[in-house]
Amino acid sequence: MARDPQSVIEPSEQGKRITKNLAVTTAGLVAAACLHFVILVLIARYLGVERYGQLSYVLAFVGVFEFVANAGLGQILVREIAVRAEGVRRVVGVTKSLMWALSLLTFAAIVVAVHLIGATPEIRLAMYLAAGGVIAVIHAAAYSAVFRAFEEMEVNAAAFVVEKVAFLVLVAAGIRLDGGLLAMCGAMFFAEVLLCAYYFVVLWRRHFRPRVYVDFRQWWVLLAESLPLGVSAIVRRISWQADILILATFGMTAAVGYFSAGHRLIQSLNLVPLTVAQVTFPAFSRLARGTPEDLRTALERAVKLILLLSFASAVTLAAAADRVVDVLYGSAFAPAAIPLAVMGVSLLFLFPSSLFMFIFTAMGIQRIFTLAALASLAVKVAVDVALIPFLGHIGASLGMLAGEAVLCVTASAVLASRTLRVPWVRLAWRPGLAALAMGTVLWAVRGTGLVLFVAGVLLGGALYASILLLLRAISPGEIAVIRSTIRPHLRSVSSQTE
């Protein structure tokens, strides 16, 4: 008989570690997200709709090539270190050498592609800067994988903030110097290089000095494991950028700007499930080699947490999209409200799918997720091509919703076929009911003044949390895990203040 994740669970060491890492990572993520919102607003207001659309096109074009250099190696590295910690120096060194080879090939491919599309000199240089930043992030991810595998998430949490602070400072400097599009891309490039340097130094001081080892035989082993995941990541990256590229193909530059305003916000929010997935991935990798019952219980708990977060995010954007756009971007971006509301609904599918990608990797069936991602991309492109000529940026948002729904349903069906059925109704009805109450409050205050609107958001959030507690959406056992995790820290603080 399957255990109900709503039942009482014993606060294990693994549970405490995951809870602590989630808390630390969430703190870093919230700080980084706040900084990222400020950066987005500054860039959007500075560049305006048309130039912001150009920046989005540059990032979308270069982003298609990003996972060619990564090839899914980061996740495979985490899984291998989490399961077999011995030989970590060697596997990191071999992975780094393979990443360098793939990075150089990718940059060469970007140079060729940029010349083939006949980009203007400014756009061409902007793409080169963006490509350099992407490659720096890829190498930083290799170092980050070590800390994820060792479950030292405080290092990654600090990295979130370091990178965003550097980016903010550089963006502000670029705006002050009126450097335009190139200054914004240059700010991103130097911020990502600093991020890579940060990881290198911390890894050296905490564990070992990372060195590069060339082992062609091991390269093929790594590629055989990571290639399906890399293809899946490339497909997902193309899927993320497909709407923007199709809008640009139809010559709808302003629509790209409107769609991108909401799309960037959705990308930022997707860091939430990715953070949960990254924190739990080492544990899932170990559980996947144990009993199916333990893996199923852990999966249900993770999905339950993801649903709690997705319902709150989705209802906020769906009910108050117009106010969110006005506060963040200003009245010039008012047409971005409807697509943002539609994309907000897509979070109900996007958040679980982001978790499933890691689950499939932990189970060693990443090839199947690649097929599901391809199906999702096909549906998204079909809907985009059919609707964008008539609905513009709204059609693009509907394409995104359709694609994410297909991916989530397909991945869930695959897991069910492998005795990992997710009880969606049992896990979703509590946060769904709480989100309905929260959405009612937000809808009532969306047309009010800013002070009253903010008060309504806070009230809606408090109502959401209260209903979740009343409905016991968080079980006593899970509360026990949280308490057992934070109690030692509270005692430490108390003893220091006495």
Image (cartoon, rainbow, N blue to C red):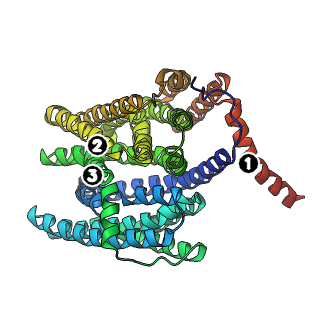
* Secondary structure of residue under mark 1: helix
Spatial CA distance of label 1 from label 3 is 40 Å
Q: Is residue 437 above or below residue 381?
A: above
Image side of residue 280 versus residue 468, left or right = left
Q: Is residue 81 above or below residue 461?
A: below
Of 498 and 81, nearer the camera is 81
* Residue labelled with disc 3: 231
Crowding near the residue tagged with mark 1, few <14, some 14–19, many ≥20 C-alpha atoms within 10 Å: some
Total residue callouts:
3
Q: Nearer the viewer, mark 1 or mark 2?
A: 1
Spatial CA distance of label 3 from label 2 is 26 Å
Spatial CA distance of label 1 from label 2 is 41 Å
Which amino acid type corresponds to the residue marked 1 in the rendered image? Ile
* Residue labelled with disc 2: 259
Q: Which mark is residue 486?
A: 1
Which amino acid type corresponds to the residue marked 3 in the rendered image? Val
Which is more N-terminal, label 3 or label 1? 3
| Residue at x 75% of width, y 44% of height | 484
Judge whether residue 490 can be spotted in this image.
yes
Q: Which mark is residue 212?
A: none
Which is more N-terminal, label 2 or label 1? 2
